[in-house]
Amino acid sequence: MNSISWIVGHLAWHEQRYWLTRLHGETPVPVLNELVASGGPATTPPLRQMLSAWRTVTRAADGHLDSLSSADLLGDLPGSPPRKIGTSLRRVTYHYWFHIGEILAIRQILGHPRRPEFVGDIDTRAPYRPESGD
């Protein structure tokens, strides 16, 4: 089982790899490549450090992602393996869902109180909104 701190850092590593390093040639938190990359050695980095890294990476990635158009999503993500940007966006989203489920299982095993349940009031808080066009 992964540690929660590794999972947080690993998700930051994935976003950094796709949206910053591969798409823009930027690597703001290079230590993620050493500590939490896929296939790397098992680690349990400090949670504060990984949360800080995640915030740094997602803040930087958000600006790039917000600027993408529907046409951009059909473009290629540089690097290997070859993937479309839109498919990569789905991959990162599903990767989050997988690891968030893992974190919830860890928290349940540890007996943490106040765990979120299901998706909540998605109809009010996050309803579907069609694209407004580019």
Image (cartoon, rainbow, N blue to C red):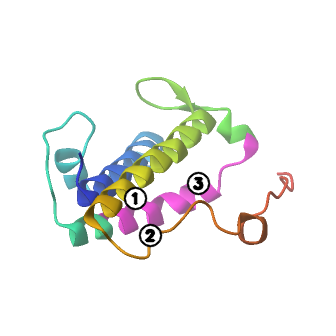
Type of amino acid under label 2: Arg
Which element carries disc 1, helix, strand or loop?
Answer: helix
Q: Please name the residue shown 52% across and 38% down the image.
A: 91
Earlier-in-chain disc, 2 versus 1: 1
Q: Is residue 62 magenta?
A: yes
Camera-nearest label, 1 or 3: 1
Q: Magenta segment, which residues?
A: 53-70
Name the residue tied to disc 1: 104
Residue 23 located left or right of residue 109: right
Q: How far apart are marks 1 and 3 (CA)?
A: 27 Å
> Secondary structure of the magenta portion, mostly?
helix
Q: Is residue 2 above or below residue 57?
A: above
Would you say the residues marked 2 and 1 are in contact, meaning their CB atoms lie under 8 Å apart?
yes
Name the residue tied to disc 2: 115
Give the label on residue 66, or none. Answer: none
Earlier-in-chain disc, 3 versus 2: 3
Residue 108 located left or right of residue 83: left
Residue 89 located left or right of residue 123: left
Q: Please name the residue shown 53% across and 27% down the image.
A: 83
